[in-house]
Every structure is written in structure tokens, then in C-alpha cells.
Image (spheres, rainbow, N blue to C red):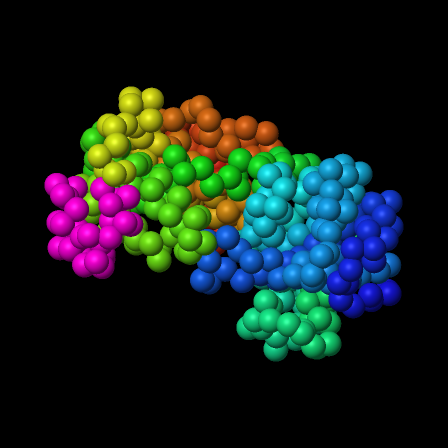
Amino acid sequence: MHIHGLIEDSAALANLCSRFATKPYLCVDTEFMRENSYWPELCLIQIADDEEAAAVDPLAPGIDLTPLLDLLTKNEDVLKIFHAGGQDVEIVYNLTGTTPHPMFDTQIAAMALGQGEQIGYSNLVDTYLGISVDKGARFTDWSRRPLDKRQIDYAIADVTHLSRIFPKMLEKLRKSGRGAWLDEEMERIADPENYRNDPDLAWQRVRIASRKADVLGRLKALARWRELEAQGKDLPRGRIVKDETLADLAGNPPKKQADLARVRGLSAAWASNDIGGRLMASLAEAQPLGKDELPTRDERKPSLGKDGALVADLLKLLLKIRARDINVAARLLARSDDLEALAAGQRDRLAILEGWRYEQFGRDALALVEGQLGFTVRNGKLKMTRTEETS
């Protein structure tokens, strides 16, 4: 494989992308910093196919990333390969307003092949290539320049290894017939809506016990205000106000700005400064949530009751058995929320009752809930059996 090293000028990047644009797949990884900012600072982009690889320096003066971003988001003929690529995809979304497509995530594929719930990159490389990954540069400040050769080699290795792993993984998926299982998952993670930070929806990430429309309306207004403050200042939202303080303000709103001095988690200076004034303005503009926005009990958590909780436990046991039997990560088959919803009587909008999940697990899960399936022990192993066989 030809390693280009660090690409720092637009012409070299455009030439490389023109070659990659004719290939069937492209492995992608990024290095970024976000500990002290709202927006992740993109510091390096690594790309490789089976013949050549490079690291691209997005911080290089005057470099035009358009050919690379177009390759990632507009070229439908090239499959983009990531490992646990959620944050990488988020960065591309922030730069372009859309996501890489089509894409393939090797961590999700490993789940379909029974290689763990969330296999890490190092373990994946060890499993497929028998290589121990050099972890010496993990804590590099990727925003600092210059980067030395060891750092660049470390970063590029992430995609060169991936370019060797992907064909092996693809062959396993073809032999197992599980490639189709992943189509829906890959489309889901490529959906741009997953990466859109809508300030009007930010309240949904904040835990709060109240279900009152006025309290949740204040939480929505406060969360929107915090999101805009964090974006404008490019600071993590928790640096503006922590979630628990936001929930407390929504439940016990101060009557005047001076009262902010007594709110735990806020600086006393907020009682008179501009940011405190903007917080109070957001509270003043808050409206109770409308009925269409209020979370229903089903959306928060199904009302199970004692018997329903036991049924959910049985479903989780069935999930363990089925995941073991077909050698797939349980998390890929079903989520706990879906199992609890099924136990509580919900039958629509459940992933386990659709597509391949229904065939592999959902049909039996439904039969268990409806009394048509039971557990038995045979030769010391827990098995499932139809109730007609045990009656």
C-alpha cells in the first residue's frame, strides 16, 4: 500500500480524491478535539482504500476540503467505511449539513457476526489481523502543529487496518447471509436527522421527573436558551448550565433576576449580568407544552406493573438465549425499551416486530407474551418450547 503521509494542499487532496472516487469503498476516520468546545474541532481526516492511504490536515492554511466532502456525501458509488463512526459522521454533518452515504460501520457489522456488543477498534484489529495496535498516541493533542511522523503514522494506521478488515468482514457476512440484516441499520446511522442539533428539541435530553405542561414548557425554553448560548460561545452545554440546574430552574422558576444568586449551580454574578438576563428572558417567553409535545407514558417508559415487569424479564431471558443460539449481539437484536413496551402491551412501532428482527426474535417474543411459548431445560441447557408440547 502506498502511504502519502500528511496532505496539506488543495491540489494534492483533489488529485487523491479523484482516484478514490473510482474505487468501490473508502475507509474514513477523524481526529478531533471537543473537551472545551461545543463544536468538535476537526484536526485530521484519515482516508484509505486497498491501494493508498493518507492523512488530510484540515487546519492547513487555505486547504479546500470540498473534493473530500463531496466524495463523502455526494458520491453514491463509493461505500464509506467507519468504525463506531457516530462522531465522525457528526463532524461531516456539521461541515456539510448532510452525512456520508452509503456507509458501513464495522462495529455494527461485528455485532451481527457475534463479536460482542460494542467491540473496540483495537480488539477488531487483533481479531481480524492479529495485530496489536500501538496506543501510544491516543492522548495526542491533535490540534497542535507540527505533527510528528509517529503521530501521523498512528493516525493513518487506523484506516489502513480498516481497509484490510472490511473485505474479510464482508466475506463473513456473505457466508452467514446476514448482510441484509445490516441494510436497515446502516441507513439509520446515515440519517441526517440523527445529527441535527435542534435547540427546540434539546429539552428532551434533560432528565426531569415532572410531566406538567408548564414545567416542561419552561424546560424547553431554558434548554433552547442554553443550546444557543453554548453554540454562540462554542462551549460545552454543561459549561453554561448543568442539566440538574436546568431542571431545577424549570421546576422552581425564579421570580426576578436577583433570585439567580440563590440558585445552586449558578454564579452569583448572574443576578445582574447579561447572561442571567437572557436566562430570565427565556423563562418569561416560555409557554406550556402543547398536548402534541407532551411525552406520553409510553414514550417515557411503559407502565408495566409487577406482572409486566416479570414478563419483561422473561423476554430478556429469551433474548439472551436467542442471541446465543444464532451468535449475534443481543443489543443488535432488541433494546430493553422495546422488550418492556412489548410486555406492556404495545404492538406497533416496535423494531422487533418488523423485518429480520421479527423473523429471528420478534415472532418468538410475541408468542412468549401471548402464552404460546415457554422455557424448559433439556440436557442441562435452557431451551424454548411451544406450550402445546408441554401441556
- Residue visible at 17% across and 46% down in the picture: 257
Q: Determine if the magenta segment contains residue 268.
A: yes
Which one is in front, 43 or 205?
43
- Residue visible at 70% across and 54% down in the picture: 28
238 above or below 221?
A: below
Which stretch did the figure color magenta? 253-280
Left or right: residue 186 compared with residue 313: right
* Quadrant of the rendered image containing residue 192: top right
Q: Quadrant of the C terminus?
A: top left
Which one is in front, 116 or 57?
57
- Residue visible at 33% across and 54% down in the picture: 240
Q: Position of residue 206 (x, y in %)?
A: 32, 45
Left or right: residue 158 compared with residue 249: right
Left or right: residue 34 compared with residue 216: right
Q: Position of residue 303 (x, y in %)?
A: 27, 33
Q: Position of residue 241 (x, y in %)?
A: 30, 53
Which one is in front, 298 or 276?
276
Please, what is the dominant secondary structure of the magenta stretch?
Answer: helix
Q: Determine if the magenta segment contains residue 335.
A: no
